[in-house]
Image (cartoon, grey):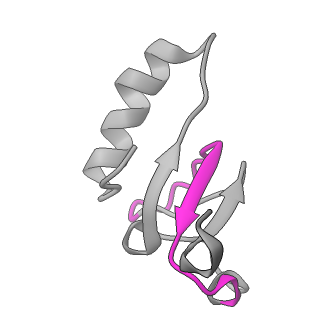
Amino acid sequence: MLGDRAVVFTTAPITLADGSEPQPDICIAIPPESRYDARHPEPEDIYWVIEVSTSTLAYGLGEKIGLYARKGIQEY
């Protein structure tokens, strides 16, 4: 549905300002995909990240959501 308006990554790292590289289940980023040939998407490249969770729901809604928010991910 997104067509050429976004790049969809599944279980791939993103790079945050502190150098950490979490791997959300889905990352929707600004195209083109070639802009990520030499680097991972960073907060300014990301439309939103999606985490799918059952056993780690508390972690996803606690620590991980806080990490993403502090590092500039606007939609989680």
| Residue 38 picture quarter | bottom right
Left or right of 75: which side holds 38?
right
* Residue 53 or residue 72, whichever sits in front: 53
The residue lying at 37 percent from left, 35 percent from top is: 65
The quarter in which the N terminus is drawn is bottom right
* Secondary structure character of the magenta stretch overall: loop
Q: Measured from the top left, where is residue 16 in percent x and y?
A: 45, 61
Q: Residue furthest front?
A: 1
| Residue 48 picture quarter | bottom left
| Residue 6 picture quarter | bottom right
The residue lying at 65 percent from left, 63 percent from top is: 8
The quarter in which the C terminus is drawn is top left
Q: Is residue 19 magenta?
A: yes
In the rendered image, the vertical position of residue 48 relative to residue 60, given as above or below: below
Q: Measured from the top left, where is residue 10 in percent x and y?
A: 72, 52
Confirm whether residue 66 shows in the render.
yes
Left or right of 44: which side holds 38?
right
The residue lying at 58 percent from left, 67 percent from top is: 2
Confirm whether residue 23 shows in the render.
no
In the rendered image, the vertical position of residue 10 relative to residue 29, given as above or below: above
Q: Measured from the top left, where is residue 23 in percent x and y?
A: 63, 48
The residue lying at 43 percent from left, 33 percent from top is: 64
Q: Measured from the top left, where is residue 40 in percent x and y?
A: 62, 72
* Residue 42 or residue 25, whichever sits in front: 25
Left or right of 43: which side holds 57?
right
Q: Where are the magenta residues, as a range?
A: 17-34
In the rendered image, the vertical position of residue 61 relative to residue 2, given as above or below: above
In the rendered image, the vertical position of residue 67 relative to residue 63, given as above or below: below
Q: Is residue 18 magenta?
A: yes
Q: How many marks?
A: 0
